[in-house]
Image (cartoon, rainbow, N blue to C red):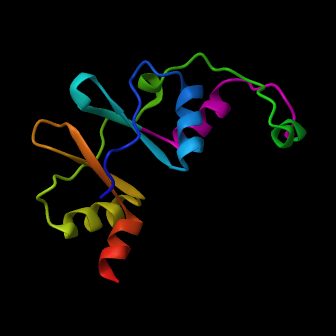
Amino acid sequence: MKSPVITCKPDTPVEEAARLLLEHDIHCLPVVTEGEKLAGIVTESDLMFQFSTVPVSGSIKDLFSRKRAHRTGRLAGEIMVHRVATVHPDDPIQAAVNLILKHGYGRIPVVDHENRLVGIVARKDILHFLK
């Protein structure tokens, strides 16, 4: 389990959420409210979906020059997945394995009994445990 977890707030602009994913080389960003309560999660796919719903200017060559071609004006709270599968710190490892396999997740947030984010379990964490 990784802790502390890189997170954002519901009012975080999606561009900032994308920056956090890239800067920390992570694939999802838990969205937390005051008190670190889990509100949802933003994934790379959620951010990519924004480009299919909002017209984007720029060309493929702009990707290579790293030009910023677009701002969506959207917030993490608007695009996050609200219903997030979670596990608790005392749950058996098999519970995380089952959720990962059933839903195809790469990682599962770990919350306490008050829904406060305390960590995240990734597929790699489980593989390291098994070796």
106 vs 68: above or below: below
Q: Which residue lies at the image location 63% right of the left edge and 20% below the top edge?
A: 72
Q: Quadrant of residue 2?
A: bottom left
Count of numbered circles in the view: 0
Q: Is residue 63 above or below residue 87?
A: above
Q: Give me the residue at 58% from left, 42% from top.
A: 23
* 73 over 67 or under it: above or below: above
Q: Position of residue 9 (x, y in %)?
A: 38, 25
Q: Is residue 74 magenta?
A: no
Spot occupied by residue 127 in the image (x, y as percentages of width and height)? 37, 75
Toward which corner of the image does residue 81 lie, by quadrant? top left
Q: Position of 111 compared to 67: left or right?
A: left
Instruction: Give 21 or 95, whichever is nearer the viewer.
Output: 21
Q: Residue at x 29, y 60 (%)?
A: 99
Q: Left or right: 10 with respect to 61?
A: left
Image quadrant in which the N terminus is located: bottom left
> Is residue 44 part of the magenta span, yes or no?
yes
Percent x, y for residue 58? 84, 29
Q: Quadrant of the C terminus?
A: bottom left
Viewer-side residue, 79 vs 6: 6
Who is closer to the viewer here, 74 or 6?
A: 6
Which residue ends up furthest to the bottom in the rendered image? Answer: 131
Q: Position of residue 25 (x, y in %)?
A: 55, 50
Q: Kindly identify the residue that appears in the image at 80 percent across and 36 percent down.
A: 66
**What residue span does the magenta drawing correspond to?**
42-60
